[in-house]
Image (cartoon, coloured by chain):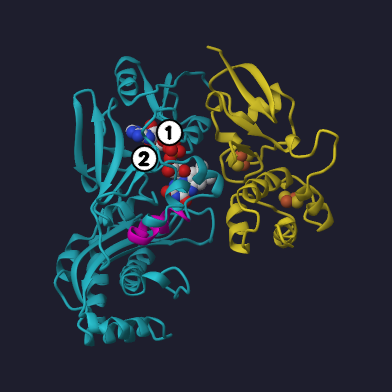
Amino acid sequence: MKSYEYHKPKTIEEAISLMGSLEDAKFIAGGTDVMVLIKQKKISSKCMVSLRNIDGLAYIDTQNGLRIGSGTTHNTIDENGHIKRYYSALTDATSRLGSKQIRNVATIGGNICNAAPSADTACPLLALDAKAVIVGQNGSKTTSLDEFFLGPGKTILSKEELLKEFVMPLYGENTGSAYIKHTRRNAMDLPILGVATRITVSLPDENISRCKDMFCTIDSISNILERLKDEGVKCEDVMIAMGVVAPRPMRAKNAESVMKGKIVSSELFEEIGNIAAGEAQPRDSIRGEAWYRTEMIKVLVKRALIKSIDRVIRPDEAFYPERLW
Amino acid sequence: MKYEISFLLNNDKVTVEVDPVWTLLYTLREVFGLTGTKEGCGYGECGACTVIIDGQAVNSCIFPILEVEGRHVTTIEGVASKDGTMHPLQKAFVNEGAIQCGFCTPGMIMSAKALLDAKENPTEDEIKDAIEGNLCRCTGYVRIIDAIKSVSKGR
Ligand SMILES: Cc1cc2nc3c(=O)[nH]c(=O)nc-3n(C[C@H](O)[C@H](O)[C@H](O)COP(=O)(O)OP(=O)(O)OC[C@H]3O[C@@H](n4cnc5c(N)ncnc54)[C@H](O)[C@@H]3O)c2cc1C
Ligand code: FES
Ligand code: FES
């Protein structure tokens, strides 16, 4: 391996100006992607600019929504009870990303900037409507995460720009979210397919306890959906994000707009699954073939949506006892 | 270009001249001769190289050496007492038959130690979570999980 210079700036400004002045430099955060690429000789930058020693890149701020510093490790996110309760899709991702050893060092910023189509935190962040705050030599700007990804390994960041944090809106008691990572193995596997959803529902107060009872039965999803329809559960807002189905993590925007404002029902879910599958452009790969991914989108979009609704209706039981979805 | 760094290695302060491309694993084995920490895959997949940095289990094979500056690194050599008495976890692995070829064992012990140091009485799920990044090709994991359970507090 070729040697490189290694810089450990203490502030964001210092990091950015180093990137501007050094020739052939690359940021390294937790290094779980970068170090592997260096060892595989796929990167041979002359200079590394480490983000690990910058004060104020690793934080979780839950006042008025959610802000997560790009240098926050997956493990730190995973242990945060507020995120688990109100931004559940994110915890679904961080709890199964890599191994404990990886989660202890790998950062959420690195996961997003690496821009793999399979990046586990990408779908949850998209579905949770995250904005990315980017700092460059001319100050900072905010973009929606949807505009951030350009293709595999490609983002809108220029060399000197640093991703500072993710900002998410405040979600109330009638919003739930979920991420389903579809893998062959339970641990240490990248997704064949990933689906995240966030839904805000309205339902008449007096019907809540009946809905709760429904989720505690062993009824099929379609039966539960029919009952939710009878109780008048309405989708006020929804976002659906899919990973490993296109060159970049993407939203199923047509499916979202069809669903918005409708009463939840079995037919609606069927339709939403089909529309979302139609929006994806999966490829054949060693982890799964395109037709299989298309079929599984239909299943997983439905599951993620019902899991999200389950979390609105049974917030205390959302994680245990858990139903199949 | 060489850099000089200092850190705590198994409770001893060490100062060493390193090349920034070195990983912590390389430095431990080739500079300090601490060969208890193993290299399996070299890419973060197998956990054979697990060490504890400031209380957290980490894959040393993809950890840049310059990032241990000022930090506290514990390897398998630092787990037993100075007089050679084995740590309860090490005894448990022997007693429960949790070792066959032994290649995964140092990493397993480090992951288990990080867990037990943070949580005296983990659930089985928490134990599985802690060692999900440690591959063992021999034992089938059951005895490893039993060994870790046996040293949980209150058993
Ligand atoms: C064994 C193993 C298992 C894994 N399993 C999974 C998995 O299950 N799911 C998954 O999604 N990923 C997985 N990964 C990939 C990796 O761990 C994640 O993508 C991780 O979140 C990357 O974070 P990092 O801090 O290590 O990034 P780094 O490797 O430090 O950086 C990644 C990229 O982002 C850039 N970068 C980092 N931070 C910033 C910033 N603030 N601003 C601008 N650019 C930045 C770097 O220059 C680099 O290009 C795995 C990796 C390994 C080795
Ligand atoms: S050698 Fe480090 S994880 Fe395999
Ligand atoms: S005992 Fe042989 S790999 Fe675990």
Q: What is the x, y in percent for residue A170?
A: 24, 55
**Viewed as shown, does residue A107 lie left or right of A228?**
right
User: Which part of the image, by quadrant, shows the C terminus of chain B?
Assistant: bottom right
Q: Are marks 1 and 2 in contact (CB under 8 Å)?
A: yes
Q: Residue B112's x, y, as percent?
A: 67, 50
Q: Whole-Å distance between the Cαs marked 1 and 2?
A: 8 Å
Does residue B90 appear left or right of residue A16 in this picture?
right
Where is mark 2, residue-wise?
Answer: A109
Disc 1 chain ID: A
Q: Which residues are magenta?
A: A84-95
Using residue B140 as the reference point, say whether residue B130 is left or right of it: left
Residue A92 part of the magenta segment: yes
Q: Quadrant of residue A266?
A: bottom left
Considering the numbered disc 1 on the image, is that residue within a helix, a strand or a loop? loop
Q: Is mark 1 within 8 Å of ligand 1?
A: yes
Q: Is mark 2 within 8 Å of ligand 1?
A: yes
Q: Earlier in the sequence, mark 1 or mark 2?
A: 1
Residue wearing tag 1: A29
- Magenta includes B137? no
Task: Classify B34 as above or below A308.
Answer: above
Q: Amino acid at mark 2?
A: Gly
Q: Chain of mark 2?
A: A
Q: Position of residue B109 (x, y in %)?
A: 71, 47
Q: Which chain is yellow?
A: B
Q: Residues within 10 Å of mark 1 (few under 14, many from 20)?
A: many
Q: Is residue A33 visible?
A: no
Q: Which chain has been coloured cyan in this picture?
A: A
Quadrant of residue B27 in the image? top right
